[in-house]
Amino acid sequence: MPPSVGPINSVAVVIDNDLWEGTVGDTIRRYFAAPIDGLPTEEPTFTLHQVPPQVFEGNTRNSRNVLIVNRDNEKKAFVKENLFAKPQVVCIVQGKQNRDIACKVEEYHKELVNEFRNNEMAETRRRFANALSKDKQVEETLGVKFTMPAVYGVKKYGDNFFWIERNIKGGKASIILYEMPLGSIPTDEEGRAKAIVKMRDSIGEKYIPGPEKGMYMVTETYLAPSISEVTIKGHKAIESKGLWEVKGFALGGPYINYIIEDKAHNRLLVAEGFLYAPGVAKRDMLFELETIIKSIEFTR
């Protein structure tokens, strides 16, 4: 089977022109190209490339993520793996009428988006494989390890705070790790949001300075962070996405924060990725940071 190809976070949409230009295409774009939460400018979840069915042959079939939409008497949505290339996820949506197809896209979009995202995380980790970091500082101190490229440099500040950083086009990509007491984040929605902002701002003041004295990273509160509950390697976690800025200075960017429950050690492990890259697209770099964080495994 040929190897799959394509940029990270791209999807080939195999669909007739009339469907693509009508209600079905609008529904696909609404869910698969929806703007990502927490970015300063609109960037789509996936970059979509329409492929008419009559030209979907040969190398065109080798896209890593494929969404096939067609008319069929049976209304359903399902997923196939490695149908034309490997690794590959092929999501198929079908129905008799345009309305039937659009309804199936709407009904199953979350599951299909997750299939593509998981495939892209696996591909991102595969691309890391040839040059992995061998730094053991984080594992020796915090008892966690993760899959990360060697281009990231690890620096330790204090007893249990790590700042991991790499240079990227236009700026830097960072991951920070630290611990919080178990139970320090309230369970109610409003209290949880306030506690996360307070936690981030206190860490920013202590460890992440701005260009001048008295300046440091804080949470941008003009737009409230989006907060959800997720699971990372069997551990409950709180995911929050939003924007950071430097207090008293025009500097900022997006962040994605995970507060991971570690009951065995009576703690919360906080892992956050953030970007400083003004003027460039941020989706794929933030996705790389998310992929690294979600590879975390507890080793003790």
Image: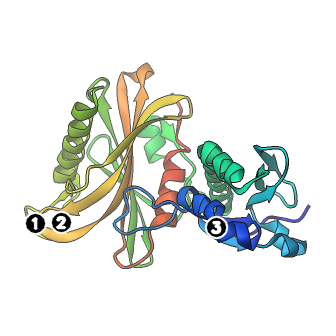
Residue at 65% across, 71% down:
21
Foreground residue among 159 and 162? 162
Quadrant (top left, top right, bottom left, bottom right) of the N terminus: bottom right
Point out the tag, 3 or 2, that comes first from the N-terminus: 3
Circle 3 — which element?
A: loop
What residue is pinned by disc 2?
210
Mark pair 1, 2: CA separation: 9 Å
Label 1 with label 2: CB-CB less than 8 Å: yes
| Sequence-wise first label, 1 or 2 | 2
According to the picture, the residue beneath numbered tag 3 turns out to be 22
Residue of label 1:
248
Tag 3: residue type? Gly
- Residue 211 versus residue 272 in the image, above or below: below
Q: Quadrant of residue 69?
A: bottom right
Q: How is the image coloured?
A: rainbow
Q: Amino acid at mark 1?
A: Gly
In the displayed structure, does residue 37 sit left or right of residue 96?
Answer: left
Q: Would you say 28 lies left or right of 171 here?
A: right
Total number of numbered labels?
Answer: 3
Q: Amino acid at mark 2?
A: Gly
